[in-house]
Amino acid sequence: MDDKAKRLKQDYKQSSRPMGVYQIRNIINDKILLGASLNLSSILNRHKFELKMGNHRNKTLQAEWHEMGSENFVFMILDELEPKQDTDYDYKEDLLFLEQYWLDKLRPFGDRGYNEKKKI
């Protein structure tokens, strides 16, 4: 690998990607799936791909996607974490806190959403 390729690879690894909390909202019944990720664009693309392919891990969401159509679902970023100067900073705890905040606020369980309550 030449120096330019190595430098590009290192720059990519050190670049920050948007991280935070997202939702997938069914605009017909207002149900949501809420989640958090260290890479928002990647997780949203994965959800879209799985739903389009018909093999999303959340079977209720998948069934309603199939029944109501993709045009009735909206993908949104609710909150983002700001990157720290420290490139070794671990964002997992901050992300868990932010996700719990939104879960408590929106309560996307049962008739209100596609999330399942986490077992403690």
Image (spheres, helix red, strand yellow):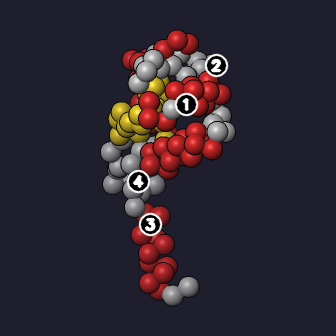
The quarter of the image holding the N terminus is bottom right
Q: Given contact means CB atoms under 8 Å apart, are the residues at marks 1 and 3 in contact?
A: no
User: What secondary structure is found at the residue carrying circle 3?
Assistant: helix
Q: Given contact means CB atoms under 8 Å apart, are the residues at marks 3 and 2 in contact?
A: no
Instruction: Look at 41% across and 53% down and name the residue there.
Output: 17
Marks 4 and 1, how far apart in space? 28 Å
Label ID, residue 119: 2
**Mark 1: which amino acid?**
Trp
Residue 91 location in percent, x, y?
A: 45, 43
Q: Earlier in the sequence, mark 4 or mark 1?
A: 4
Residue 51 location in percent, x, y?
A: 58, 39
Q: Earlier in the sequence, mark 4 or mark 3?
A: 3
Mark yes or no: residue 97 visible.
no
Marks 3 and 2, how far apart in space? 36 Å
Q: Earlier in the sequence, mark 1 or mark 3?
A: 3
Q: Earlier in the sequence, mark 2 or mark 4?
A: 4
98 to 85, vertically: above or below: above
| Dot in front, 1 or 2 | 1
67 to 36, vertically: above or below: above
Marks 2 and 4, how far apart in space? 29 Å
Marks 4 and 3, how far apart in space? 10 Å
**Mark 3: which amino acid?**
Tyr
- Residue beneath disc 4: 17
- Residue beneath disc 1: 65
Instruction: Look at 35% across and 49% down and name the residue there.
Output: 83
